[in-house]
Image (spheres, rainbow, N blue to C red):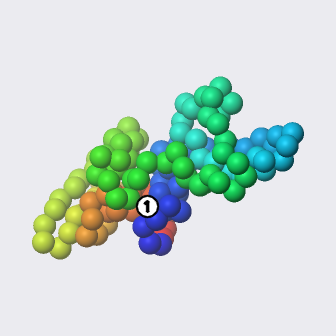
Amino acid sequence: MKAGPQLNALVAERVMGFKQFSQPPDYDGLHGGEPVLFPPGMDPVKSGYKYPPKGKVAFAALVPNYLNSIADAWPVVKELCTDGVEVQIHVDLLGTHVAVIDGEAVLADVTEKDAPYAICLAALKTKGVEL
């Protein structure tokens, strides 16, 4: 799967704990119940989030750009470490190598040109998602 909004959304859901909520239909029919990903701890009702008109909101509008920004990908590394695993990142002429290790077991070993993309693919592999 290529880097893009769908892969960012997959990282958000499977690794970072985002949840899908559908927009509540309203009396005038402008909001039609399209799903939106919300971060953990953000209540879609209590947050005051204003749903835009029907068809105008991207599914992953609230999802950080994990795949293209090292600043956004770093919380993915921290999330993996909270699961008690070791994350090793090594950069050389071939690209960025990311290994996720749990004791003696290698849960993921990924090499990609871009560090954020490698981090995200390794994180997804540790969660059982094969791309």
Q: Position of residue 86 (x, y in %)?
A: 29, 47
Q: Position of residue 2 (x, y in %)?
A: 44, 72
* Horizontal side of residue 29 vs 104, given as left or right: right
Q: Residue 122, can we see it?
A: no
Q: Residue 39, can we see it?
A: yes
**What residue do we see at 32% from left, 62% from top?**
118
> Which is nearer the eye, 75 or 37?
37
Q: Position of residue 85 (x, y in %)?
A: 34, 45
**What residue do we see at 52% from left, 55% from top?**
9
User: Callout 1 environment at 10 Å: few (<14), some (14 to 19), or many (20+)?
Assistant: some
**What residue do we see at 82% from left, 40% from top?**
26
What secondary structure is found at the residue carrying circle 1? helix
Q: Residue furthest left?
A: 93
Q: Residue furthest right?
A: 27
Q: Indicate whether 117 appears above or below 44.
A: below
> Which is nearer the eye, 49 or 17?
49
List the residue tagged with mark 1: 125
Amino acid tagged 1: Lys
Q: Position of residue 127 (x, y in %)?
A: 48, 55
**What residue do we see at 27% from left, 65% from top?**
114
* Horizontal side of residue 127 vs 87, given as left or right: right
The image quarter in which residue 24 lies = top right
Q: How many marks?
A: 1
